Each structure stands twice: as structure tokens, then as C-alpha cells.
Amino acid sequence: MIYEILKLGFFYGCFIGMVSIGFALIYNILHIVDFAHTDRLIVSGYVFVSALTFTNHFAAVILAVAAGVIFAFLSEWLIYRQVRKYNPKLLLLTTFGLSIVIQNVLAIIFSDSLKEYPFVEQTVLQSNLYIRELLIFPVLLIISLLLYYWLKKTKSGLSIRASISNLERAKTLGVPINKIYIIVFVFSGIIAGLGGVYLSMGYGLTPYSGFKIMIFAFSACLIAGLNNVYGSVIIGIIIGISLSVFEMLFNALSAELFTLLGLITILFIKPHGIFGEKLRII
Amino acid sequence: MDLLIYLATKAVIFIIFLIALNSLMLGKMNLWAIGNIVYFSLGSFITGFVSNNWGINDNRLYLLFLIVPVAVSIVSLIFFYASRVFKQDFFLFFSLFFIELNFVANKMVAGSSGYSHIIRPSGIQSDLSLLVFSVILLIICIVWINNFDKSRVNKLHSVMRDSEILAFSWGININKSQIPLFIASAILSGLMGVMFAFCTYGADPKLFTTNNMIILFALLILGGIDSIQGAVVAGLIFVFFTYSLESALSSTFQIHAPKITQIVFGILLIVIPFIMPKGLFGKRNFQ
Amino acid sequence: MKESRIDISADFSFSYGKNLLFKIREGQNNIVLNCGRIYGIYGGNGCGKTTFLNILNTFLKPTTGKVTFTFPTYNYVHENDTITASELIGNNIRRCFQTPLLVDELNIYDNISIVKRLLKNENFLNTFALGMNEKKDSEILRLLDLAHFTGNEDTATLSYGQRRIIANLQVLYSDAQLMILDEPFANIHHDMIGVLKQEYRKKVIQNNSIIVIVEHNKTNLHDFADEIITIDNKQLSLRD
């Protein structure tokens, strides 16, 4: 029983950790919390579930990831970039607006009720693990390693790190900032796509599920320290386990309450994160 | 006519709530205090709790105008501390966090559908008397904020908003200056929560969500920062425009009308930076 | 009435982490900044001049030793964090920052008038009262006249040099016991510099106050300051 709880929590935490990587990346480049990130994840989830009605799983995953990438690309190219030109300080409100639009459009198309995975999940061989559980941790590892390799070893990664460190200086040195933004959003779109697939298979979807995931995922970023993308994965896993344990002890609602209280307490004690630099500007 | 009085009362309640947010938190301290919805919901839920769980349905309900300010003042100190610890976006995120916490806590205490059948105390039992009472509160609020804007304290807040280092170098105790604003804003918002519960005879957790608060915030930006007129415009749009749009759409789109209304507001949020960065009556650009 | 004075103990030093920035020169006793005097700070780039000003402004605490402030209305020993610095600063200390910090929402007149804290009028409960109109202060009008301003100008439209002049006028108006000036005359026209120096000198004599000034321009420093504090080779020393 306890193994089951910890297992559930661990894999959900991996999912949270993966989503938090997307948040951390976008935050470090754009310096805003992109509230629409988890809503793009939900869109990908709906695309995956809808695609399963006419194609196989593999193709449905590809379509879901493609949807995440396209949405992310369009968000940046059509909306965020234009807002940045006019008034970058209002970009945060724009992400909210996009989030509200996506949620309600999904609610109109698919209704408010829970959209479940249309098949019964089977465990893999004798492992007592579902295929999504078997894959989430390796996928998370691959994403983290790819990100590490990309940021440390490639030219575009160097440009991204330069932009993170000092955007104005990077601009004057000729770093193609708009291209950097597109790359980061495409990466976050891939994460959103994969996250949407995982969420729809394991937990079902509602148009408004994204908000709660956003709260937990961004908390993981804050607690780890916004400059520490990999730390947020560890914190995400801890959040997942905590939710699972509290749900076992009490109920789902109490689990959220106690986890949120715990997160707030940690944020008060360590406002700049456990592994991160000081955020407060004096 | 009854409908008009009901909508007008709702509008006045939201206007006062938005004045508390716009003129005190956003205007004086440049804080994206979307967490004010927590005070509003606390006011409503404490009213519902007292009315439904304790069965108090007589003039003792007026004690809520003492109880709620105390309760929300305590919560406001948490937000105040958070505003000193977290800056800018992170305070906004903390506020979202707290809204979610509040939502979960409300559902646990009051259930998914919240409280209903809240009775009004005598003196404000009719819709018209409630409207008159709300308007009196609105007038008091406007007179106070106008005086505040002309006072020397307002200039101190301009300094603190512009540069905390400068304020500190002039011996301005930032904590001492900001705490009264947090408490005042919380008390006004909490009291409007009580009024809202009386107006709608209930307290539903689904009303006090982030989406609704963000929409109110966007309308405030449209109305203009640190202006009473801006808060009035935002409150009127939120109540009358929403009602009109939902009514107009419901015949064609039925259950989707509220969602389409939300989509309209979401698009407004995206478009505001282009059309009106300062809003209609704002004293300065949004930061 | 008590006279203003700042005592810097002989064991005074400041370090960033393990790196010593400066300490009192060996063999020197404690440094005393007396009222009615102007002290210049001189040293190379990065030697800690602004850090020293930050300590005098109570933004930073000394790593070792103590700084004792004696003002007519307040006594304070700045060696640990037991007291709120804002109470000390009150109306006693004012600073002209290296980058002029003005409040762009207020006009020039308000930027200067707000510097002198009128604590009675700053009570939150006063916000409920009818608008309190303060009469225009003749001292501010006189200072504005020196610099050819009317006071109604929008601060946001001023040039850098004009902003620096206003920052100086703020300190002059404040009647502070300790005036901290961080390169106050940069980007200001030569004639105006002369006027400002005269006004500062008058204030120091009239109010028995202390000025501590950082200047890279040796001429400005030597013909303005009575004594020079040098920071050289991580050592702080005072000489006439």
C-alpha cells in the first residue's frame, strides 16, 4: 500500500518536475510567469485523446507534441512578441488573458466534465507499472540531459545563457533574441505536449486542470530557486509524493490544502529558494 | 426594476472593492494585489458560516461588521509580510497561491456549492435599503480616498513607490507606512464580501476564483490606475456588461454564454497593452 | 544643546565576506567628525568610498568597531541591528546619491518639500481629514530661484544635470545634521557649482551640521572640504 502511494506520488512528481522545467526556462528568458504554459499542456492532452479516436498511440503522441509546439510558437510569435514591443510590463496580464481564452474555448468544445483516457491502462509485463509511468522518468531524464547538453555545449545554448544572464548586453552583442525566444517556447511546447499525454492517460482532463498544475509546478521552481532548473525537478517529485501521502492520510482536498500550506511555509522561510540566488532587490 | 436595483447594488459593492484595490494597493503601493479577493471571499464565507452553521439570522448579523474586519486584518498581515519578502511577479504568484488555498479551504468548510439562504438583518432586508446602504458606504469611501490623495501621506507613498532606497534614506519607515494600507484595503474588501453575501443571499466558492479576479484586475487597468473613476468604470462593466452579454448570448449559445463572456474578457486582457496602456482615467502607466 | 558629532572607533573596519575593504589606519585613534566641518573622502576606484557613505547612512553595519552618531535629538551607536535605522535617519541624515534619485510623479517643488519630514502630517489617520493644504515654503522658493526653477516643472522632463541640481537642493532644504554627498557636482555647470558650495557652507555654519562628500575632482574637493579622509591601501585616515 505504502509502495503504491509513493509510486503514484513519485511519478506525479516527475510530471510536475517536467512542467516546472518549462516554467523555469520561460521565466529565465522572458522574466515572466507564463500562465498559459499549463493550458497549452491541457490543449495537447485534448489533442492526444481526440487523436486516439482515429489513429494509434504513437501518432497521437506526435500530434499532441506537435500541437503543444505549434501553440507555443503561435503564442510567442503572434501575441507575446507584439505585446513586448508595445508594453512589456503588461505581458503577465497577456498570459493570463491567453490562459482564460484557452480554458473557456476548451470548455465550449469539450465541456467542463472530466475527459478520460478512452482505453483501460494495462501494466507492463509483471512490473505493476503502467507504460506512462515506465516512460515518464526516463523522458524527464532525457529532457534534463538534453537541456544540460544544449545549454552547456551548443552555440544556441550559449546564446540562451547569455540572454538569461543579461538580456540587454546579449542584444548588443548580436545574439538573435527573437530566435532564442522561439527556441525556448518550442522546447516548452514539447514539454507541454508530453505532459498533456501523461496527464490525460493517468488522470483525465478538464479545461481548468491547468491552473492547479501551474501552482505546483511554479512553486517547485520558486522553492528550488529560479536559476536552478534541475532543482525544480527534485522539488516537483517531493511535491508529488507529499500530495500522495496526504491523500492517503486524509482526502484529496486536504492533500492539496496541506501541500499548499507546506509550500507557503517553505517559501516564507526560504524566499530565494533552497538552491537559488537571492531574488529580492534591495 | 428589482433586477436593476439588484445589479446596481452588486455594482456598488464591486466598485468599493475595486476602489480598495485600485486606490490603496495598486495605486499607492504598486502591488498587483489580486489576493484581495481572499478578503472578499472571507467576508462572504464568514457571513455564510455565521448564518448557516451558527443559525444567527437576526440583527446580531451586524456584528459581522466588527468580526470580519478583525479576521481579514490578521490575514492582511500575512500578505503584508509576503509583500516584503516577495517582489513583483513573485508577490503576484504568492497571491494566486493564496487564492487557491482559500478556494480549497472554502470548499472544505462550506462544501462545493458553498452557503445559501443567508438572511439579511433588519434595516437592509429590502433590496432598495441594501442599495442605499451600499451607496452611503461608497460616498464615505470616495470622500476618504479623495482626502488621502491630497494628503502628505500620499506623497510619501509616491516616494516609496518610486524608490525604496530613496524612501529609506529619508527616514521613511516603509513597514509602518504600508501596514495601515494593507489593513484598510482588507477591511473594505472584507466588508464588501459581507455585503455581497447579503446581496446574493449566498457564498459560492466558484465566484471567488482567480479567473474572476484577473478579469476584475484587467478592467481596473482599462479604467486606469489609482483613480476612483477607473474603479467605477471597472465595477460597472463587470456587473452590467457581463449581465448584458450573458443575456444576449444565452438565447443563442445557452450554457456557453458565461464561457463566451469570459473569452471576451480574456481577449480584452490580451488587447489592453495595445489600446490603452494608461487606461481611461489612470494617473500613470501600468507597471 | 548637544552638538552633532560622529565617532568612528579605532577598531572600525568593513569587509565583504572575508575580503577586507578598509579599516582605520594603524596608529590612528578613532576618527571624529565634528559639527560645522566639511569632510571630503578621497580614494581610487573601488576603494570603498561609497561603501563608507553607506555605513554613515546606516545602510550597512561595520564588520568590526562601531560608529556613534550624536545628534541634538538622537543618540545612536551603529554596531548591531537592534534599532531601526529609519528612526535615526529621521530628519538627521540626508544624502545626495551618485545617481540623482527623484520622484518622477511629483513636481520639483514637491520633490524638495517632501524631503523634510513633517511627522505630524504623516499620520495615516490624517488621510481621513479634509485635504491639508501646506503653505508654500519660502525657503524652497528661494532655493528654486537660485537654480532658475519655478517649482511646477515636471521632474521627468529634466536633464541629468538639472536632476542633479534638484538632488542638491533637496539636501540643502532638509536642514539635516549629517549631509552625505556622493559626487554632487558632476554634470553641473561651473557657475551653479559655486552657488551650491556657498549654500552648503552657509548651512554647515548656520545649523552646525556635518558634510561628508565624495568627489573625484580634486579641485572641487580641496577648495570645499576642511579635512580629507583618504582610503588608500585599505586604510582609512583623516588629515587636514
Image (cartoon, rainbow, N blue to C red):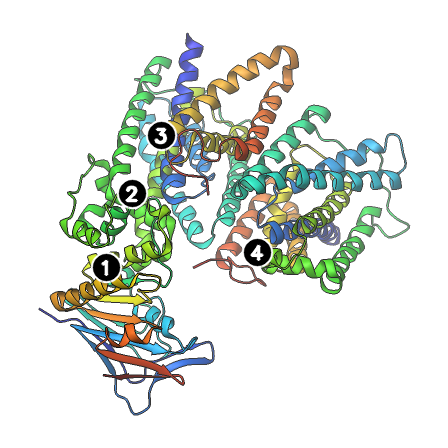
Residue assigned mark 4: A168
How far across and down, in percent of the image, does residue C64 sit? Answer: 35, 80
Total labels: the figure holds: 4
Viewer-proximal residue among A254 and C116: C116
Q: Secondary structure at mark 3?
A: helix
The quadrant in which the C terminus of chain C is found is bottom left
Which label sits in the foreground, 3 or 4?
4
Question: Residue B132 sits in which quadrant?
Answer: top left
Between marks 3 and 2, how big is the CA–CA gap?
A: 15 Å
Q: Is residue B280 above or below residue C78?
A: above
Viewer-proximal residue among B203 and C39: C39
Residue assigned mark 1: C90
Circles 3, 4 touching at the beta carbon (< 8 Å):
no
Q: Chain of mark 2?
A: B
Between marks 3 and 1, how big is the CA–CA gap?
A: 33 Å
Q: How many residues crowd mark 2 within 10 Å: few (<14), some (14–19), many (20+)?
A: some
C80 lies left or right of A100: left
The answer to whether marks 3 and 4 sit on the same chain is no
Q: Amino acid at mark 2?
A: Asn
Does residue A199 appear in this view?
Answer: no
Between marks 3 and 4, how big is the CA–CA gap?
A: 37 Å
Q: Which comes before the other along the chain, label 3 or label 2?
A: 2
Residue assigned mark 2: B154
Q: Which residue appears at 23% of the width and 51% of the height? A: C148
Question: Residue A63 sits in which quadrant?
Answer: top right
Residue assigned mark 3: B228
